[in-house]
């Protein structure tokens, strides 16, 4: 291909405002992608070629596990999502429209419903299991705040796989294979990653793991113990909560103003405070009680209470409920309210807690003796400098961008959508399901962000839009004929820089594009029958006899494990 | 791949109701595709493999013309379509939704706006032209009546190409290359087709050609002259209209009831009648006057009058306009109305026409002398047994399914969306544009419909989901080891029928799937060191030494021009 024919050339201007996402900036200014409106991205030919390489790599890894490619529609009748109940969730920011017959349709943000309903016809007997299918299909989320172009766009391409199993054990045995395949994919793309337990959230199911690119601009927070290797998303990460212990003392009312939630955790750190906060969920009021040396996690509180949404109750509403906003407390509560208590409160003795009257606390409050709860659970955040529950090591918080996520969905969708099969003893059973997703745009971003230097992009050979960049110096027919005869031999894998630009510009652009091998044909070396070969990855420059070039390049391709 | 692992097996039941679209019926019952709701189709692994082959073939042909793959989003802000004005058209049945910020978004039914707006950054100078890009992207049309699954679905995958040129001549020179590439694609898929001039319609532009699969269940009507080769879509096809000639006679009022539009054309054929019909367009009332021996074409009337929509005016409304519904006539018309006259009326003398009063006609009406028109044009349908304007041959009407359509869009979108470049003399010019589309689902349907016999599908080798179907007869380890060792050698191109079904069922299913080569390994022939090789395409059965098999298959692949 000729560089002059490409839409999307290297942008020498300063139009691109540098962002925290250098991979994006490079992909945009080198002409790989281009924003097409808020949360919408177009792929230019260079970007499309890398995207197709990513699809091929993922396809190879999935096919090795017996995966089969399918395609289910982006648009779904809403009634399919009524079966799973997920259409009522606001978490996925579903875009909907009403068709001309008045039926509500939606743009799928993910495809569990579509695929489960598709394979209902295929899974009748235990002989039809396991089944593993995947697709590369558009998704859409009506994001209010898309950000970082490829990182959180509204329309995005996803590689999504779905496996169906006879039982939990079979799913459990398949899961590590997917896990390993995802690791291989990221390694082939030379993308650094950390894996961690994650929050299943909107996807339901019992357990999930995510693959995160460590990145300061990321919104994903991973709690990690460098000592024992424990890693989990902050939404579910647990830490050691040393109980305040001691013999139970008599409860008494004391003047106090530290236990108002207005005061920062820092002021209370190390003090035996118990704090209370009230939320409104879809169904009811919830009062969360936790220790003042921790921070409440609404994500965990949602999980413990099975709530989709939790809205903090404001002062006005608190007063209407008969609660003093400056002394929220489980004591003398007159409104029906689900009381949820963090396990550290249960384990601690002699806490100081709001009394329900402004300016007063009860000291020496003890759970069980002085107040009780409807639910007990882990509802506080783990963070930097908290201690690891497993080994006692000091936890760290790593910021990053979620690239991929794999879920054990168990029988959630199978049950909701009526998927069942006959086992060997003719009993009707429900398949166990896993789902596995890689954001293709994010993967492209991560590959660019992780593979670059001061001069520009630096693609692994398997991902590169072209393996070879070729330019001639000089306008003589002998140069041009050599250039195009070599280009013909290199076929689809060469980009010929045929522009009438200066050599300096061309060399700079070649570096920017990140093509692994640069070949220059010039009069100076042609007289000696040589061409110049520069490898972008190891920065090596050599002069090679023209006749040796092709065998040398083929050898390099073999070394790199490239398909010929 | 093992057949038992596939979702979507051959359906032996009679669940599939036979339709006029046998290709669909076969694709559904053989497990290639599956309906997923009204106007929504899922692709199962077998169908996906054929679809990927179709994409590859098209990609090869487009790359040969210098095409480059890109991807623009399905979802578009409506304001982009306001620039082209196409958002106000009802022809494309656009599905819309309002995003959470209140902006109107639409699901693109086609991508001229998106691509023109994308390349605005790339086309600044004449050196940036020509430019040819393509994509395989979803489209959506909110069809009230989707039909024939792949033939008219609401969500569908399209291959769409867009070329931009310095001027009309350059576009004009590129067009035959696309035309030839499209013919090669259809030939490689062994799909019979007819090409014809077509209606540009919603796509605007000056001229278009379509590629139609002749099919009795199709809605596309092509008028063809077998004598001279003239072919055009009925929406624009012209025929010879022999004028009624003779010396102009005096107009007079006579009693008559034949000229009411209620009477069929047959009764009036050969008689010199002029008929009138009134329509309401977006802007005004339109009266069409045409000869009674022809049928009015509202499509042509739209084109002549530049209307998006034409609604026939009912009796009640006619009366309100002061027009007698039983004698619609241009005489004594009191309502402002655009009068459009078919050219055959202009050329004919002494027509009989409604007088405006029920039961009476004027005879010997002559255009120009007795009434006049705002516009003159071709507004009647050509049909079977009409005469060819070029050679006088007898026209035929061919029914079919539109598979592909290529458009000369000229400067419509460039102008509307502000695309311009500097020519060699530094003058600002507007690029000329072409757009080219192939419905991928329809192409799959056509390939299936055109390549089948009484036993099932019969894929051309290039399209086949697998090149080889392999089964062993007998359960001995020696059979199984031979089967799987051969399967390993044939790699990604073999489907192993590992089911515990009878041989008859397997042979029938193999025929149904349409895989070109069937290989059977059985004890009977294995003793002689032979295997059975059956070719589905030429129905040849032979026994081949096991050691000769692989070279033989590789030779067959080379013959078929398959990539290895």
Image: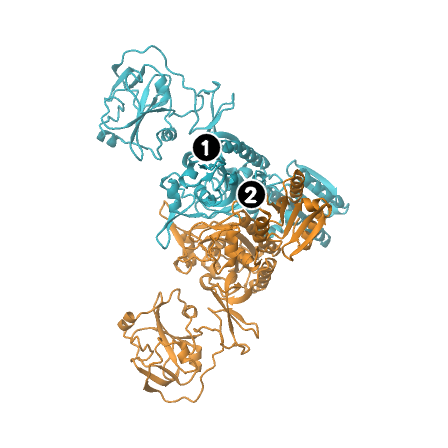
Chain colours: A cyan, B orange
Name the residue that disc number 2 marks. Answer: B4
Label 2 CA crowd tier, 10 Å (few <14, some 14–19, many 20+) = some
Residue A282: % across, % down? 31, 35
Q: Secondary structure at mark 2?
A: helix
Label 1 CA crowd tier, 10 Å (few <14, some 14–19, many 20+) = many
A81 vs B43, left or right, is left
B362 vs B293, left or right, is left
Q: Please tell me if label 1 and label 2 are on a single chain.
A: no
Name the residue that disc number 1 marks. Answer: A220
Per the model, the C-alpha gap separating discs 1 and 2 is 41 Å
State which quadrant residue A62 falls in: top right
Residue A88: % across, % down? 35, 41
Query: Could you tell me which chain the residue with mark 2 belongs to?
Result: B
| Label ID, residue A462 | none
- Given residues A264 and A221, the one toward you in this image is A221
- Given residues B255 and B435, the one toward you in this image is B255
Residue B399: % across, % down? 50, 66
Query: Could you tell me which chain the residue with mark 1 belongs to?
Result: A
Q: Which residue is located at x 35 percent, y 19 percent? A: A345
State which quadrant residue A297 falls in: top left
Residue lying furthest right in this view? A528
Residue B324 vs B20, above or below: the answer is below
On the question of residue A337 being in view, the answer is yes
Which is closer to the viewer, label 1 or label 2?
2
């Amino acid at each position: 291909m000729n560089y002059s024919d490409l839409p999307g050339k290297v942008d020498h201007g300063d139009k691109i405002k540098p962002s925290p996402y250098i991979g994006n900036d490079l992909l945009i200014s080198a002409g790989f992608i281009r924003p097409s409106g808020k949360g919408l991205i177009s792929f230019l030919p260079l970007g499309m070629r890398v995207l197709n390489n990513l699809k091929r790599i993922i396809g190879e890894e999935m096919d090795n596990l017996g995966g089969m490619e399918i395609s289910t529609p982006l648009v779904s009748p809403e009634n399919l999502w009524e079966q799973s109940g997920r259409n009522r969730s606001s978490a996925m920011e579903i875009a909907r429209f009403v068709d001309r017959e008045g039926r509500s349709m939606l743009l799928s943000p993910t495809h569990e419903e579509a695929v489960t309903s598709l394979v209902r016809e295929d899974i009748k007997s235990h002989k039809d299991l396991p089944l593993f299918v995947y697709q590369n299909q558009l998704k859409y989320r009506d994001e209010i705040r898309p950000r970082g172009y490829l990182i959180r766009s509204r329309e995005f391409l996803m590689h999504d796989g779905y496996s169906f199993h006879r039982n939990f054990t079979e799913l459990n045995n398949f899961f590590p294979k997917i896990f390993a395949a995802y690791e291989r994919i990221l390694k082939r793309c030379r993308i650094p990653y950390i894996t961690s337990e994650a929050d299943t959230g909107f996807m339901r199911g019992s357990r999930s793991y995510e693959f995160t690119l460590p990145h300061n601009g990321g919104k994903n927070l991973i709690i990690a113990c460098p000592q024992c290797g424990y890693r989990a998303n902050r939404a579910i990460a647990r830490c050691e909560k040393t109980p305040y212990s001691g013999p139970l003392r008599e409860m008494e009312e004391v003047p106090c103003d530290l236990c108002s939630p207005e005061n920062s955790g820092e002021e209370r750190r190390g003090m035996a405070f118990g704090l209370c906060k009230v939320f409104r969920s879809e169904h009811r009021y919830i009062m969360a009680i936790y220790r003042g040396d921790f921070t409440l996690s609404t994500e965990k509180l949602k999980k413990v209470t099975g709530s989709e949404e939790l809205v903090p109750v404001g002062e006005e509403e608190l007063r209407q409920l008969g609660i003093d906003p400056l002394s929220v407390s489980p004591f003398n509560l007159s409104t029906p309210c689900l009381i949820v208590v963090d396990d550290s409160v249960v384990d601690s003795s002699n806490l100081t807690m709001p009394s329900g009257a402004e300016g007063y606390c009860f000291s020496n409050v003890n759970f069980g003796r002085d107040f009780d709860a409807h639910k007990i659970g882990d509802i506080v955040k783990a963070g930097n400098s908290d201690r690891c529950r497993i080994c006692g090591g000091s936890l760290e918080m790593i910021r990053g961008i979620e690239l991929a996520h794999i879920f054990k969905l168990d029988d959630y969708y199978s049950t909701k959508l009526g998927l069942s099969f006959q086992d060997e003893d003719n009993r009707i059973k429900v398949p166990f399901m896993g789902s596995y997703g890689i954001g293709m745009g994010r993967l492209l971003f991560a590959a660019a962000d992780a593979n670059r230097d001061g001069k520009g992009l630096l693609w692994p050979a398997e991902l590169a839009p072209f393996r070879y960049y070729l330019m001639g110096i000089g306008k003589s027919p002998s140069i041009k004929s050599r250039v195009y005869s070599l280009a013909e031999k290199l076929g689809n894998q060469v980009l010929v820089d045929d522009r009438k630009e200066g050599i300096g510009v061309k060399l700079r652009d070649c570096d920017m594009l990140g093509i692994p091998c640069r070949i220059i044909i010039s009069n100076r070396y042609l007289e000696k029958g040589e061409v110049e070969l520069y490898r972008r990855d190891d920065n090596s420059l050599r002069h090679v006899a023209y006749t040796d070039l092709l065998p040398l390049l083929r050898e390099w391709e073999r070394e790199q494990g490239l398909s010929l």
